[in-house]
Image (cartoon, rainbow, N blue to C red):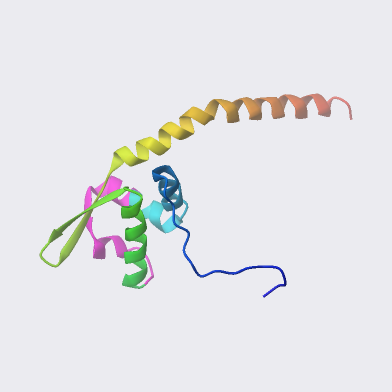
Amino acid sequence: MAAGLIHSHMAIQYSDPLDRTFHALGDGTRRKMIAMLAAKGTLSASELRQPFDVAQPTISKHIGTLEAAGLVTRQIEGRVHRFSLKAETLKSAEDWIGDHRAFWEGTLDRLEAFVTCEEGFE
């Protein structure tokens, strides 16, 4: 390990619901699982695992992250665990992005104007 770096095996704990949502959305496997639930409605853990070449414990960790973020709900029917998308949590993330969209669009417009202006000076 490089000098001056501190390495910790402790997982980051997100206390803010929006932080948990964006953390959960930050992984491609979890985003695909969300897309699968959006398309199919309700899926079992084994159905969620099918498209991925990973072990069941890995899928369980992904599902746990989605549950901790409030993005999915679990129903237990005997030994089968079924999951459904909780869309209102995604709405909170969408609202946050929407609130900040004007800033980013304005910033990109200003950048485009700057680049266009700079090109005229070559």
Above or below: residue 15 compared with residue 81: above
Q: Quadrant of residue 75?
A: bottom left
Farthest-out residue, bottom: 1
Query: Residue 84: image x %, image y %?
Result: 24, 50
Q: Please give left or right for residue 106 compared with residue 18 in the image.
A: right
- Please give the range of residues in magenta: 35-54
The residue that appears at 76% across and 26% down in the rendered structure is 114
Q: Quadrant of residue 111?
A: top right
Above or below: residue 32 compared with residue 38: below
Above or below: residue 11 compared with residue 121: below
The residue that appears at 39% across and 44% down in the rendered structure is 17
The image quadrant where one finds the N terminus is bottom right
Query: Residue 35: image x %, image y %?
Result: 34, 48
The residue that appears at 59% across and 31% down in the rendered structure is 104
Q: Please give left or right for residue 32 compared with residue 118 in the image.
A: left
Query: Residue 21: image x %, image y %?
Result: 40, 47
- Whether residue 46 appears in magenta in the rendering, the answer is yes
The image quadrant where one finds the C terminus is top right
Query: Residue 51: image x %, image y %?
Result: 34, 63
Q: Please give left or right for residue 121 compared with residue 1 in the image.
A: right
Q: Please tell me how many numbered marks the rendered image carries.
A: 0
Farthest-out residue, right: 122
Depth check: give the residue in front, 113 or 76: 76
Farthest-out residue, left: 78
- Whether residue 117 appears in magenta in the rendering, the answer is no
The residue that appears at 34% across and 53% down in the rendered structure is 68
